Amino acid sequence: MKESTVSSTAEPQSQPVNQISMSAPKKSFLAHFQRWEWMLVLLVVLAIVINSRLTPYFLNAQNLSRTSADFMELGLMMLPMVFIIITGNIDLSVASNLGMCASFMAVLWNLHIDIWVAAGAALLLGTLAGAFNGFLIARVKLPALVATLGTYAFFRGIAYVLLGDQAGRGYPPAFTYIGQGKIPGTLIPFSVGLFVVMAVIFGLVLHRTTFGRYIFAIGNNENACIYAGVPVARIKLIIYTVSGFMAALAGLVLAARFGSTRPDIGTGLELSVITAAVLGGVDINGGIGTMPGAVLSLLLIGLVTFGMGLKNVQDQVQTIAIGSLLILSILIASIARTISAGGVRLNWRTVGLAAVFIVIFGAFFFFFFWSRAPVLKSVFG
Amino acid sequence: MTVKNPSATRSNLFITLTRFREFGIILIILILAVLVGLRAPVFLTLGNFRDILLDISILVIVALAQTMVIITHGIDLSVGSSIGLVAMMVAFIIKANPHISLVLVVLLGMALGAVLGSFNGLIIAIGKVPPIIATLGTLSIYRGMVFLYSQGYWVPSYQLPDAFKMLSKGTLLGVPNIIIYAIIVAILVYYFLNYTHAGRDIYAVGSNPDAAQYVGIRKQRIIFLVYVLTGIAAGLAGVLWASRFESSQTNTALGFELQTVAASIVGGVSISGGVGTVPGVLLGALLLGMINNSVTLVRISPFWEQAAQGLLILIAVVSDILILRRIQRAKSK
């Protein structure tokens, strides 16, 4: 299902400006590594093969349907995050915004206000919060990392202020349908359908409109854009506002899926969102990235996590795999780029020194991990 | 970074500028102190000041290291997880060997931290992975390792020997040890950043990496160094954390990395590199500590604590950038 939407938008994308400015790309094997999407397709296929080999429960429509809904909040927030990272900015506040909006809705619901009015108000609050981020970044010209670090603490704080030690629960079935229900007649969860529609819209805007080209242009050279008359400030304001709206939407979906709301809902999700976008080939320095790549990476994260879950790997240990996947993907891409650019200019003394350093300390470190050998046996044995 | 005049007045202007930056924070601190002092006079007592310092000591140690990383135009998001992992490993080691020498424990913690930091440094300096990505990855990896190592168990207070608890709780001439450690670290970092070649190179790499390379600074080595130093600081913080809170849990220092970044930024460290001072960061950490402390004293619901902290971070950075812009405008006239 997800893959079919991917192929609908995964057409050869014109090269970002800063790649053109580099010397003509050589058609070597390594050059193909730069088409990150193919790498991701390969990894997704690999994950499916390995998972179905490891456990018979993997290729089970019920299971796949249930687990796919678990990643949709992440996906909804990832879509605008792709826009933001391509412009060379970042939004650390999305998960806090999600928490604030879900808490706001819960407070209104607890005051016996109609659930749809409460949900609408929450969406409005999230949009305003996103616009506030956009204002700080586009108008006050704070660095995005600084501004959203502040609102990260502020929005989460407001969630605690609103809900305190209370919780929102007992939502009507019509509302929990958003997070738990399936599209009638199919096994596809409603939230997956919502995500697919949103992904297509965001993908088309990014790759088929002037607005989307502006986003790439800002990421490549913001000053040049300003001189060329691109409304940089307005575009930033818009994408942060959209990010706020999507965070609120994700908050509603998450609250509906859990069936309850606490002020700490979604804590830490911002890092997963950024991980998903970056693993999808979106360059953290801006200017490069595709929507199909980001969606593929979400699929990959979902498959890897689901497979490990079926093999009874603890949630917390799964984060090791996701973190390693993130670092390795960027590391391999970075090494491939260095080699294909032809210039391996490593300072061998530095490399040697670092290697010695890490070998000595690595041995030391593992000696202490070894002192809890049963742990290692339970993992590798 | 912010000053581009190549004339001889450069260093002079720079000094004025940094003074102004810290002036802004001092002003906010004074205003907050007066306002809170009016509501709750106990805020302005020496005992309360000591409490604030106790609370921010660990933050200061890590934030100063974070500052060095940010000056090189990097960021280390893995410090919270590093602290958690070192605290967990150290706690289990002490639990198994209650009579181990405390000096050894501290050195051990710092060495373990150095390993974690050198791994960051390696992927960033030599692997050329952007710092935010690399440390985002190790944030997950190290936190996962905490669970892998502890298998969901934790070390409660009664399993830790008293001598270990006294590591942070003991006093020297009436000053709690943990404050003394923070002061020592602050002095060391101040000396390192201002009076050593490597320290000055950190600023050079941050303000203009290419120029730094042309004048013969080994950029990779400096970047590697700051991450190792941050790892060592996180290791020390991990030991102190386990000692001060008398326990080690799987969620130790969860989310602490953003507090260290906040302390640096509120303290006037520029996220784009090249700018930042030790006194500024100390003031930034002090401001964060005062906010937490005053929320309790003024009897605002504790649920307001985080919101107030976030709001004050925003006010601090916005007023800082407005002041800075005014100075620059005044200078360009």
Image (cartoon, coloured by chain):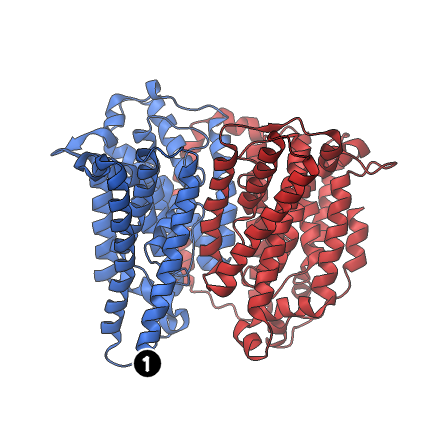
Q: Is residue A191 left or right of residue A316?
A: right
> Which residue is at 63% across, 44% downward?
A121
> Which residue is at 35% across, 22% downward?
B95
Q: In the rendered image, is residue A90 in sight?
A: no
Residue B329 falls in image quadrant: bottom left
Residue at the farthest right position: A185
Q: Is residue A3 left or right of residue B84?
A: right
> Which residue is at 23% across, 41% downward?
B181
- Vertical placement of residue A144 versus A248, above or below: below
Question: Disc 1 sits on a residue from what chain?
Answer: B
The N terminus of chain B - image quarter: bottom left
Q: Colour of chain A?
A: red
Q: In the rendered image, is residue B295 in sight?
A: yes
Q: To which residue does mark 1 refer?
A: B333
**Element assignment for label 1:** loop
Q: Colour of chain B?
A: blue
- Vertical placement of residue A219 versus B107, above or below: below
| Count of numbered circles in the view | 1
Where is residue B175? Give x, y as percent: 16, 35
* 10 Å crowding of disc 1: few (<14), some (14-19), many (20+): few
Where is residue B225? Give x, y as percent: 35, 55
> Which residue is at 30% across, 34% downward?
B297
Q: Is residue B73 left or right of residue A297?
A: left
Where is residue A167? Give x, y as percent: 56, 28
Please state which amino acid type lies under the numbered disc 1. Answer: Lys
Where is residue A120? Give x, y as percent: 66, 44
Q: Is residue A55 left or right of residue A351?
A: right
